């Protein structure tokens, strides 16, 4: 029987994925009017500033070089994933991008296997079933273009991020690890903004472009980034990377539901069948499993 801690972690990560799905209508609107660099930089700057006060909470362990190293590595990999995603979305439809990004569900156990980890046949089959569900929802065929390759980079880097998160979360405080990640991504996003946008009247340009989106930006930064990053780090202390990847495969399902609610986009029969396959994969992967062991520190 699964432990309560394991079940709470599953629910926490499920809520994280639900919130990520809710960002789909927002990002669909914002990416058409904001430069990708400014969108990522401002989103993660809000998230980092929101999380800084948490670092002053009592009873937190002192900062260590190991924490800064692990947090900055996670932040760098996550930034690469976000960068590749927004660049790819400039030329790839959201539907096709969801299919390709969903490949991380299969990439996680495969990368783990390449690193010498064991994997049960059931969990691997569930990961394949979840991937198949995303493929059915997307219904995409054809050759890969440059945008597809960017989204592939996004999927691969996020699979690496999931494995790295599993490996380091047990070593550090979730609050501190989250803060270092967010600060790293924010700094990289700001650097990318300074590199891509004209420096003349930069402040005025930034304010003008962000003003229509400040409510969405606050939601993206506080809830969909700061809160969900902490929830993700906290939950993955008690979940395997493959379990996490299967739960993450629900993101396109939730995105479709929120799009129907906010944008009146309806699921077709094919998309509904794909959503059901993803749900079945999630449930099947959990039936009969013993509680996942927390990730152990290396060395």
Image: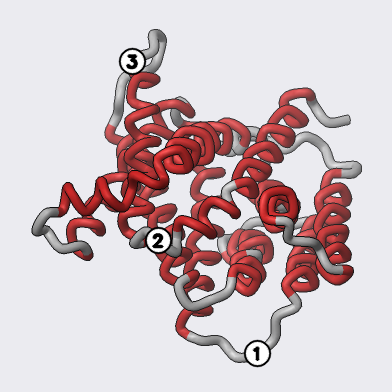
Q: Is residue 58 left or right of residue 151?
A: left
Earlier along the polypeptide chain: callout 2 or callout 1?
A: 2
Q: Is residue 258 left or right of residue 177?
A: right
Q: Residue at x 28, y 34 (%)?
A: 65
Residue corresponding to mark 2: 33
Q: Is residue 171 visible?
A: yes
From the viewer's perspective, is residue 96 above or below residue 263? below
Earlier along the polypeptide chain: callout 2 or callout 3?
A: 2
- Residue 249 image offset from top left, x and y in percent: 70, 56
Q: Quadrant of the C terminus?
A: top left
The residue closer to the viewer here, 137 or 3, is 137
- Please, what secondary structure does the residue beneath circle 3 have? helix
The mark closer to the camera, 2 or 1, is 2
Q: Residue at x 56, y 43 (%)?
A: 166
Earlier along the polypeptide chain: callout 1 or callout 3?
A: 3
- Please, what secondary structure does the residue beneath circle 2 have? loop
From the viewer's perspective, is residue 36 above or below residue 55? below
Residue corresponding to mark 1: 142
């Amino acid at each position: 029987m699964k432990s309560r801690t394991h079940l709470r972690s599953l629910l926490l990560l499920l809520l994280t994925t639900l919130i990520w799905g809710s960002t789909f209508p927002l990002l669909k609107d914002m990416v058409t009017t904001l430069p990708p660099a400014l969108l990522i930089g401002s989103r993660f700057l809000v998230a980092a500033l929101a999380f800084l006060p948490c670092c002053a909470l009592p009873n937190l362990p002192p900062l260590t070089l190991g924490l800064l190293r692990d947090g900055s590595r996670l932040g760098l990999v996550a930034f690469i994933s976000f960068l590749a995603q927004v660049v790819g979305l400039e030329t790839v439809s959201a539907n096709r991008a969801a299919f390709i990004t969903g490949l991380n569900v299969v990439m996680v156990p495969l990368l783990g296997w390449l690193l010498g980890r064991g994997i049960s046949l059931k969990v691997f089959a569930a990961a394949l079933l979840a991937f198949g569900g995303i493929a059915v929802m997307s219904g995409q065929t054809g050759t890969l273009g440059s945008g597809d390759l960017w989204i592939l980079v996004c999927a691969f880097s996020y699979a690496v991020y999931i494995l790295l998160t599993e490996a380091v979360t047990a070593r550090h405080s979730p609050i501190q690890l989250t803060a270092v990640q967010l600060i790293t991504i924010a700094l990289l996003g700001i650097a990318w903004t300074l590199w891509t946008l004209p420096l003349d009247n930069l402040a005025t340009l930034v304010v003008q472009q962000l003003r229509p989106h400040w409510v969405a930006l606050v939601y993206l930064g506080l809830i969909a980034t700061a809160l969900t990053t902490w929830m993700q780090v906290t939950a993955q202390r008690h979940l395997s990377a493959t379990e996490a990847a299967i739960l993450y495969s629900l993101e396109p399902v939730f995105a479709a539901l929120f799009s129907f609610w906010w944008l009146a986009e309806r699921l077709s029969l094919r998309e509904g069948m794909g959503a059901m396959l993803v749900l079945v994969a999630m449930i099947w992967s959990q039936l009969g499993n013993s509680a996942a062991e927390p990730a152990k520190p290396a060395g």
